[in-house]
Amino acid sequence: MAILQERPDAIAAAEREAEIDRKVRQTELAISVLLRVGVVISIAIIIAGTIVTFISHPDYLTSADAYHRVTGASAGFPTTPAAIYHGLLDFQGGAIVMIGLYLLILTPVMRVGVSIIAFAHERDRAFVAITAFVFLMLVGSLVLGKGSGG
């Protein structure tokens, strides 16, 4: 009789483990999609900004001096949020490129944010706390960090 009682418990345990595995696979898939979509969108925005730059300044294609103005160390890309915002309003290619780069930088940060949600869903408080700390450190470094150009 003990064998019959153990069997339903073993089946229930196997079903619980299968459900956990399914949730882990779903979380990994969501993170994978987030990273891929973030990178593809970022690259598309960067390419669009590059195209806008060359359409707005066709001399970059024919003049080495003009080309060096946009690719050299003294190139004037907007780096502050205000400069990027005003550049976007003026439809400047450099501002569009910067939005793509910021999105590319933020993609792995968003991955950490999704991980917090996944760990919370699994009720894993330790990993929620650790991942939230990492997330806050990443966001803090992005907010408080200073570029060398300004």
Image: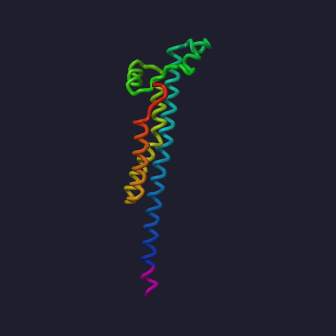
Q: Is residue 125 magenta?
A: no
Nearest the eye: 71 or 137: 137
Q: Is residue 116 above or below residue 91?
A: below
Q: Residue at x 48, y 21 (%)?
A: 93
Q: Position of residue 6 (x, y in %)?
A: 44, 80
Nearest the eye: 75 or 116: 75
Q: Position of residue 65 (x, y in %)?
A: 60, 12
Q: Is residue 4 above or below residue 96?
A: below
Most distant residue in the bottom direction: 1
Give the residues in magenta.
1-6
Q: Is residue 36 above or below residue 94?
A: below
Look at the magenta stretch and give its main secondary structure: helix
Q: Residue at x 46, y 84 (%)?
A: 3
Q: Is residue 5 magenta?
A: yes
Picture quarter with the N terminus: bottom left
Q: Quadrant of residue 138?
A: top left
Q: Is residue 114 left or right of residue 71?
A: left
Q: Is residue 125 left or right of residue 67?
A: left
Q: Position of residue 25 (x, y in %)?
A: 48, 55
Q: Quadrant of residue 124?
A: bottom left
Q: Residue at x 51, y 41 (%)?
A: 36
Q: How is the image coloured?
A: rainbow
